[in-house]
Image: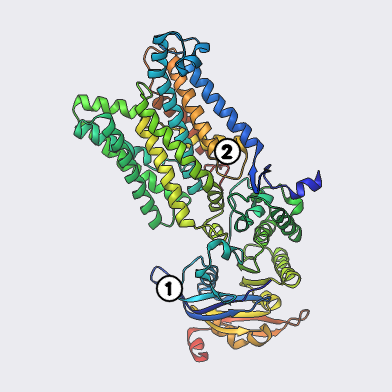
Amino acid sequence: MADSLVAEELTLRYDDRTIVDRLDVTLPEGRITVILGANACGKSTLLRGLARLLPPASGRVLLGGDDVRSLPPKALARRVGFLPQAATAPGGVTVAELVARGRYPHQRLLQQWSPEDADAVGRAMRSTGMAVLRDRPVNELSGGQRQRAWIAMLLAQETPVMLLDEPTTYLDVAHQLEVLELCRRLNREQGRTIVLVLHDLDQACRYADHLVVMREGRVIATGAPERVMTTGLVAEAFGVEALVQRHPVTGTPMVVPIAPLSIADEEAIV
Amino acid sequence: MRGASATAPPGGRRVLRLGRATLLVRPRTLVVTTVLALVALCAGAIAMTVGSLPVPLYAVPSAVLGVADDATTVRAVQGVRLPRVLAAIGAGAALGVSGSVFQSLARNALGSPDVIGFTTGAATGALVQIVLFGAQPTQVALGTIVGGVVTVVIVMLLARRGGGIAGRQLILVGIGVGAMAAAVNGLLLVRGTLDASSQANLWLSGSLDARQWSHALPVLIGVGVVIPILLVLSRRAGLMELGDDIAQQLGVRVERTRLVLVGCAVVLAALATAAVGPIAFVALAAPQLVRRLLRTDAPPVVGAAAMGAALLVVADLVTQVLPVTFAVPVGRMTGVVGGLYLLWLLVPGRGSADGKGWS
């Protein structure tokens, strides 16, 4: 159950501001891809474009070879799930109610609840550890639990491709790792294609099979973390002088930032 | 027990199988809605006993059906009291549903047609007709609808420019536009002749006095047509309460759905205001009260209609039997109660001006 997601010559705009500029990228199927880049480099915009929340100004997004614009909304929603940053539930909505809403694309006006819906909701809550909290209002949960509830909603949607925009922001480090481990498990056990926008470079290198590094609306590097994450790349993408070493436990690249590069230095590198 | 709850749909819903269709129904919603509808009907029946011609309660059904022996009773009930009660039921239901839709769209308990400027703008339309053209009731009703629709379109366009119609933006813009419409209304009242101004003032009070079939029927038909549409859309509206991005990624055509929802809500509010004048509080409070009773995550439709109808019919009954020497227009009555409710909603520390459904 996987579909690759490909952007071809994709340009995304808000009003007249071009955020993503003629970008080509392939998000390999069945892998975890992490999108990295400085603030306002267009990561979140790209994710919204891939999820068809933002129509392309030019270019196209292909899902398993189909142009996403040619798919009916519900058909697309059965293949690609997207979790925006800082989603909030109305007060009083319980975990089970929230997760069940993920089944909407599988339901019709006269088919409002099937055994498959019940199974998918149950599975989604079990694999995120939310089953015991099913009757609790989402707003009363801790940050980490709340994020897991939203991920459970996305799981119940049963899409082969899941796009998550900064799922670890606002979480403490324990909850960050918890969410990332959950993503890895979903990828390894269920073969889902997972795309994450993250800020933490070490976590990105540790959990990604594939990195996409962006700067000013364009992709400047893609590939396996071990190959991509270099001192030069950190300087180019973030304007930061850093050491890149091996993580003592996981063996993945680990970035030790030293100081922001002055503008002159940055130009010298470019 | 454990096994059953693991496969049951959440939120106290039950699966209803009709042939190949599987529908979700909520027993609690059915019970609460039925009780509210019964309250509206009973209060309506009692209201039909009140008036200069005494009609005992037991004679009301036969008089309504026109099979009572006494022709005068039949004429009084069918020609005067029944249209009044039906206008109250229709307008109350329309306001309740309209408020429910607007609050759901705005994700805020203050997002009702009275707060976002619709009612004031509708009044401007009516006053222009009354004061400037000395118009007849039908034209006044049309002026009401035009005024309300124009106001909502302005508010939506301005709110959209300011960053979307969810949340406070819609409400703040609505209050601003409503304040301007209120200023225009004040100007019209001052400019008009004494006759026109007092007629305008009467209209502004919102009254169920002298309501005829021509008042009651349009709003009842409107409610009958729009509620089924909203029932179909209510699941999508519930998803949109999670935010546009979530709804859209779940396959909801957000913009189109919102347009239809606003259209439905405006039609209902316009028909209600055209029928009975500006009635405060019902659209604001009915959806909130019924949400608390239903304890559900979905925006109420039929429940809000039943609550709105019950509130307005009871309010009208109270104004009719109130031991005062002058008749209080029902719009003023609901205004007083509504003011108190609004204060309660806004009291600092309760921290829920956004209501139970929204954070």
Chain letter belonging to callout 1? A
Residue B4 can be seen in this image:
yes
Circle 2/circle 1 CB separation < 8 Å: no
The 10 Å Cα crowd at callout 1, few under 14, some 14 to 19, many 20 or more, is: some
Q: Which residue is mark 1?
A: A57
Q: Quadrant of residue B27?
A: top right
Q: Secondary structure at mark 2?
A: helix
Q: Quadrant of the N terminus of chain B?
A: top right
Give the residue furthest to the front. Answer: B19
Number of the label disc, if any, that sits on residue A237: none
**Residue B263 vertical placement versus B344 (above, below):** below
SS at mark 1 in the image: loop
**In the figure, residue B211 lies in which quadrant?**
top left
Residue B41: image location, x then y, percent: 52, 23
* Mark identifier at residue B291: 2
Q: Is residue B52 visible?
A: no
Q: Quadrant of residue A57?
A: bottom left
Would residue B117 appear left or right of B293 to someone viewing this image?
Answer: left
Q: Chain of mark 2?
A: B
At x 39%, y 10%, the residue is B72
Amino acid under label 1? Ala
Residue B131 picture location, percent across and down: 22, 32
User: Who is closer to the viewer here, B264 or B108?
Assistant: B264
> Residue A161: where, in percent of width, then height?
63, 69
Q: Residues within 10 Å of mark 2 (few under 14, many from 20)?
A: many
Which residue is rendered at x = 54% and y = 37% of the image?
B302
